[in-house]
């Protein structure tokens, strides 16, 4: 039952030599082997490298060395570049791509002693809310394998929820950490834009992408984030402010904390049962001494249209480098340059990626730029200003993470708009660059739902503190799918 | 209408590679001539996940240029992506500046052939990265891509459409070339593509104030080609209009072998570059302190230096302009003058005359090591102290150039010392008079022109060594009899 342990417990157990990293990694590799056939959470499992790294971690621990995560197994979303291990981004385009370098996040976690067991499935180029756009097939929700795990970090979320790994890296551009966390019943943390380096994290929409954590508790998320965060001279958008000790700040009492419930999130799209779970969670926070009031962010409902202009615009440019010339998929026997471009990209990208590249190309085109891109950027400023006003009144904002629990595989693939509305409550934090997390707060029809907590810029410690105090009072985060007990 | 009734309107976009050691967004070297792709980092190759980090030195150089042309330095400028597909553009976009460039609204004064000065407006100068190179030769019909140049910093200097002839355009381009080299921000090497230009050319009836439809001639990399390409293009447009045609807005290529421009693509076929601010780079913020630091560091600029040469050395504006055309030439001249402080004009004549011609003949640059300033000064000293005449000096110069010896050694060994002994000159005059009684009689009968004949004969008799002034004086005394 070693997999019932949190990362915090595993790290302590390793240091106390209750078990070795090699034993731990073997145990998790066995779970992965069994779980993979059902969930398809991994794109690559790197067993032999993991065992080597585990042995090295054991030596470090024996010698009294080793970082805070020494010997702890984790997985990386398959868009973090890993030297010598293929990094596919869930796409045929990068099916054959082996990165020559480690992403900063990968290097930092390695330096902290974490052992990588593999690369996790995801929506192609992180574009999707259900993990159904992956070239490597859909990931299944461990709570009910006919259902999606959410996306785009669906592999990371499903693997952690099924305890195939205790924690994983993930990325969040419009909700890709928080929404799958909610749908899989785990804790997902998206930091402030600029808090975690984007270097080596394959770009989808550069002004929105942010790396973060999926784990089973806020305490574990705090521990992993502390090791991942920090200024990186290789990323001009990373911010040079010190990283506080998120773990040390977890236990602060919530007495006197002002919590704002985002009024606009209680809309007709929100499942009523889901709303009840949120209100239950707020009652718990009030019991802990926090005060809750409704706060209005009038421009927030514009988040989805703004996002679906800005993100595709950036993606259309970011994905131009996949041209079959230097790396990635290249069509067979190109006749000429145009043919090389057309077929390499036509064959390499899936339908959702193509839709967004085309949308993005359109909104940046001469004659449309002002009406779409520029206007979207203006509305983005308004949304950011709404948040700023709200944080003048309250310490954190809360609301549901997603409108509904997980849906059946295939249920929304025919209608992209319905699919896009899954992210209606999460996109705002990306547009404003704010830290936000999702914690499990109950079940609707047997499937987990999440409470979202959003904080002001660089208030990671505060929202982790709220989440941790909530988890000390509840046990939703300790529930795991029976099949993977 | 005839050609004389048309006015050509030209604006130049000059691309100057900045002389930074590393690239604008990566740490790779910018040195020229490495084996293909040896200087392409993962960032230059546009690998998945990599990000650009701005080279501060490139910014400093752009600001240096902006201050030198009296421009406005933007406190806040923005990098934008220019999106298009091409194999030598690894990311599928070029990082450039679009709506908010780092340098705006400057100008340069250009001296034209007729000695007049023209102020040419510089709309903007922005920072951007260079693309790589596509190689088509020797690859069996395939195209090779060399990304060593990809990511080399450039400033693109965009002039107003203020230029009215090919010659003006070249004069302006040379001025910019001089300036970037003075500022040590660009090596100016046109063969290696460090300094190249696009010319926007249109024509209109003289007196018209609206602009005609322009053609853009791309990537011309020599002063001569710029002149020829503009001349050709203006003539082509005039002929086209006069024969009832219409100029179409298009991009044209100059074919130096054929001496003509031809269409690359029309406006309709042009790329829509879909510019938007690059989300990987923060807006570039430049503060007052940085600007003042760069300003304090500026060298004496060409116009300032030319002004000083005129007043300090009594040179004509033209001579001062020629001598300050490059910092190396100006420094050389001043080194000569320091050794012969009483002869700045004589020094100027020698530097611009014999020395320039000799260097030019062997395609050498001043400061190449041949004829150091001290040597030339040695020669000028001997002219000034009348040891040799100007004419003999040319012979001495040639010997110095050929053999590398100093002036004094050559004068000594060849016995070229000027004759200043009045007795000796008189004797020579008397001999010449005796040998040429006919000419002497004609001269005395009033044919004054023959004076020159006697000068020549005496010079010949003395192997050119007679002091010319003394000779004149003595002849005037002796010839009338």
Image (tube, coloured by chain):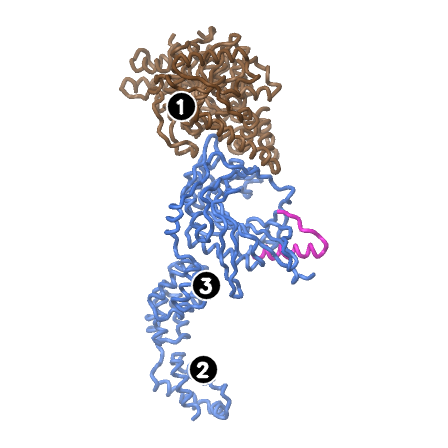
Chain colours: A brown, B blue
Q: Are marks 3 and 1 in contact (CB under 8 Å)?
A: no
Q: Disc 3: which chain?
A: B
| Position of residue B36 measured from the top left corner of the image (x, y, whole percent) | 47, 41
| Quarter where residue A323 is shown | top right
Instruction: Give the residue pinned by disc 1.
Output: A460
Circle 1 packing at 10 Å, graded few (<14), some (14-19), many (20+), is many
| N-terminal-most mark, 2 or 3 | 3
Circle 2 packing at 10 Å, graded few (<14), some (14-19), many (20+), is few
Instruction: Give the extent of the magenta segment.
Output: B227-250
Lateral position of residue B125 relative to residue B200, left or right = left
The disc at residue B456 is: 2
**A85 and A185: which is toward the camera:** A185
The disc at residue B322 is: 3
| Position of residue A22 measured from the top left corner of the image (x, y, whole percent) | 35, 14
Cα separation between marks 2 and 1: 98 Å
Cα separation between marks 2 and 3: 34 Å
Q: State whether the magenta stretch is mostly helix, strand or loop.
A: helix
Q: Disc 2: which chain?
A: B
| Quarter where residue A437 is shown | top left
Lateral position of residue B385 relative to residue A436, left or right = left
**A203 and A182: which is toward the camera:** A182
**B295 and A283: which is toward the camera:** A283
Q: Disc 1: which chain?
A: A
Q: Secondary structure at mark 1?
A: helix
Q: Residue at x 46, y 42 (%)?
A: B76
Circle 3 packing at 10 Å, graded few (<14), some (14-19), many (20+), is some
């Amino acid at each position: 039952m070693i997999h019932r342990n949190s990362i915090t417990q595993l790290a302590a157990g390793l240091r106390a030599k209750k078990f070795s990293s090699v034993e731990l990694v073997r145990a998790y590799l066995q779970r992965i082997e069994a779980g993979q056939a059902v969930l398809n959470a991994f794109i690559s499992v790197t067993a032999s490298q993991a065992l080597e790294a585990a042995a090295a971690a054991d030596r470090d621990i024996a010698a009294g060395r080793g970082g805070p995560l020494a010997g702890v197994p984790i997985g990386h979303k398959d868009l973090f570049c890993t030297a010598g291990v293929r990094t596919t981004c869930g796409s045929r385009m990068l099916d054959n791509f082996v990165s020559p370098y480690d992403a900063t996040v990968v290097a930092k976690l390695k330096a902290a002693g974490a052992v990588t067991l593999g690369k996790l499935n995801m929506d192609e180029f992180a574009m999707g809310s259900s993990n159904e756009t992956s070239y490597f097939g859909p990931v299944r929700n461990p709570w009910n394998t006919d259902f999606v795990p959410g996306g785009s970090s669906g592999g990371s979320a499903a693997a952690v929820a099924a305890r195939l790994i205790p924690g994983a890296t993930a990325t969040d551009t419009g909700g890709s950490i928080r929404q799958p966390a909610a749908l899989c019943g785990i804790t997902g943390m998206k930091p402030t834009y600029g808090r975690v380096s984007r270097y080596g994290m394959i770009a989808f929409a550069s002004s929105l992408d942010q790396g973060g954590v999926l784990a089973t508790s806020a305490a574990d998320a705090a521990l992993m984030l502390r090791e991942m965060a920090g200024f990186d001279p290789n990323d001009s958008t990373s911010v040079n402010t010190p990283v506080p000790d998120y773990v040390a700040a977890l236990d602060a009492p919530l007495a006197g904390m002002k919590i704002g419930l985002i009024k606009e999130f209680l809309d007709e799209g929100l499942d009523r049962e889901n709303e009840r779970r949120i209100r239950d969670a707020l009652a718990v926070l009030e019991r802990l001494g926090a005060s809750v009031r409704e706060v209005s962010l009038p421009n927030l409902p514009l988040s989805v249209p703004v996002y679906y202009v800005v993100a595709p615009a950036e993606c259309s440019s970011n994905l131009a480098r996949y041209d079959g010339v230097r790396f990635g998929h290249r069509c067979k026997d190109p006749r000429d340059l145009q043919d090389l471009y057309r077929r390499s990209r036509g064959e390499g990208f899936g339908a959702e990626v193509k839709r967004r590249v085309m949308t993005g190309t359109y909104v940046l085109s001469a004659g449309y730029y002002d009406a779409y891109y520029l206007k979207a950027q203006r509305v983005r400023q308004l949304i950011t200003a709404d948040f700023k006003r709200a944080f003048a009144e309250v310490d954190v904002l809360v609301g549901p993470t997603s409108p509904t629990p997980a849906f059946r595989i295939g249920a929304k693939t025919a209608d992209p708009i319905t699919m896009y509305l899954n992210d209606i409550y999460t996109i705002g934090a990306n547009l404003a660059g704010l830290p936000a997390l999702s914690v499990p707060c109950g079940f609707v029809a047997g499937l987990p739902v999440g409470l979202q907590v959003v904080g002001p810029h660089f208030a990671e410690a505060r929202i982790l503190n709220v989440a941790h105090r909530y988890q000390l009072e509840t046990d939703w985060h300790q529930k795991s799918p029976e099949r993977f007990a | 209408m005839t050609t004389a009734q048309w006015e050509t309107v030209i604006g130049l976009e000059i691309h100057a590679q900045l002389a930074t050691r590393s690239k604008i967004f990566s740490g790779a070297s910018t040195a020229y001539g490495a084996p293909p792709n040896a200087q392409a980092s993962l960032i230059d190759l546009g690998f998945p996940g990599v990000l650009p980090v701005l080279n501060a030195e490139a910014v400093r150089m752009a600001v240096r240029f902006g201050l030198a042309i009296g421009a406005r330095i933007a406190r806040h400028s923005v990098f934008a992506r220019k999106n298009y597909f091409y194999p030598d553009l690894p990311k599928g976009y070029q990082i450039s500046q679009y709506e908010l460039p780092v340098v705006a609204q400057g100008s340069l004064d250009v001296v034209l052939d007729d000695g007049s000065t023209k102020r040419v407006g510089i709309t903007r100068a922005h920072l951007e990265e260079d693309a790589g190179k596509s190689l088509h030769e020797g690859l069996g019909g395939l195209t090779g891509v060399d990304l060593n140049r990809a990511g080399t910093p450039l400033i693109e200097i965009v002039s107003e459409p203020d230029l009215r002839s090919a010659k003006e355009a070249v004069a302006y381009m040379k001025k910019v070339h001089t300036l970037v080299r003075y500022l040590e921000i660009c090596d100016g090497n046109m063969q290696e593509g460090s300094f190249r230009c696009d010319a926007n050319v249109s024509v209109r009836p003289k007196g018209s104030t609206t602009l005609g439809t322009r053609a853009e001639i791309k990537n011309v990399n020599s002063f001569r080609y710029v002149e020829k390409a503009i001349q050709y293009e203006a003539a082509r447009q005039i002929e086209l209009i006069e024969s009832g045609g219409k100029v179409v807005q298009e991009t044209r290529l100059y074919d130096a072998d054929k001496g003509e421009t031809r269409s690359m693509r029309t406006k309709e076929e042009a790329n829509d570059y879909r510019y938007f601010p690059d989300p990987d780079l923060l807006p570039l913020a430049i503060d007052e302190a940085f600007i003042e630091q760069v300003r304090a560091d500026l060298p004496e600029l060409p116009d300032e230096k030319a002004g000083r040469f005129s007043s300090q050395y009594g040179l004509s504006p033209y001579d001062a302009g020629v001598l300050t055309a490059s910092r190396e030439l100006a420094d050389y001249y001043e080194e000569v003058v320091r050794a012969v402080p009483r002869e700045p004009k004589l020094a100027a004549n020698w530097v611009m005359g014999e020395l320039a011609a000799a260097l030019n003949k062997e395609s050498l640059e001043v400061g190449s090591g041949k004829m150091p300033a001290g040597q030339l000064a040695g020669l000028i000293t001997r002219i000034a102290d009348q040891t040799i005449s100007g004419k003999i000096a040319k012979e001495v110069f040639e010997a110095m150039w050929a053999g590398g010896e100093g002036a004094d050694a050559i004068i000594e060994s060849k016995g070229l010392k000027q004759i200043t002994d009045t007795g000796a000159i008189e004797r020579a005059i008397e001999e010449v008079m005796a040998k040429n009684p006919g000419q002497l009689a004609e001269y005395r009968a009033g044919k004054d022109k023959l004076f020159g004949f006697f000068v020549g004969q005496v010079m010949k008799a003395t192997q050119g060594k007679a002091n010319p002034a003394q000779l004149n004086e003595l002849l005037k005394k002796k010839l009338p009899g």
